[in-house]
Image (cartoon, rainbow, N blue to C red):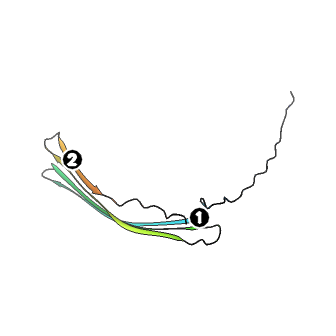
Amino acid sequence: MPTVVALISLRVEYRPLPFNWYDFNSTQKIKYGAAYSQTRLWDDRLNVTLGWRRDTYDVSKIGIRGTGNTAVVSNGAGNTYSAGAVGYVTDWLGVIANASATLPACSPPESR
């Protein structure tokens, strides 16, 4: 049985896009600190939890093609709080309460 082999030669050429889509260097730095406390009271019938977190962030982005590639820098800081409790009314029935506030999500700087 004859074997047929076909060789196809294609030339692949990579060209830069006419706009800066993913042609940039980006750096993100996030620093944080946190504290947490949990307390059990009255023979474990009430559990109280408190939490706090502090975030700071720095973001920079710079294009790597074309002229006028100035860095776009963004930074910020914020706190996240949380408080909760579980109280047992009976041995099998518990009531839960929780409240929290959070730092809005940081977004990378816009390309200019």
**Residue type at mark 1?**
Phe
Percent of width and height locating residue 10: 79, 47
Percent of width and height locating residue 49: 23, 56
- Figure quadrant of residue 78: bottom left
Q: Residue at x 13, y 50 (%)?
A: 43
Above-or-below relation of 70 to 87? below
Above-or-below relation of 28 to 88? below
**Residue type at mark 2?**
Ile
Along the horizontal axis of the image, is 67 left or right of 97?
A: right
Q: Are marks 1 and 2 in contact (CB under 8 Å)?
A: no
Q: Please tell me which residue lies in front, 84 or 63.
A: 63
Q: Secondary structure at mark 2?
A: strand
Q: Please tell me which residue lies in front, 45 or 66.
A: 66
Task: Tell me the quadrant of the picture where the N terminus can be found.
Answer: top right
Cα separation between marks 1 and 2: 48 Å
Residue annotated with mark 2:
96
Residue annotated with mark 1:
24
Along the horizontal axis of the image, is 9 left or right of 47?
A: right
Q: Residue at x 42, y 61 (%)?
A: 106
Percent of width and height locating residue 93: 17, 40
Q: Secondary structure at mark 1?
A: strand
Percent of width and height locating residue 17: 66, 58
Looking at this view, name the residue that lies furthest to the top. 1
Q: Please tell me which residue lies in front, 68 or 95.
A: 68
- Figure quadrant of residue 7: top right
Along the horizontal axis of the image, is 55 left or right of 99?
A: right
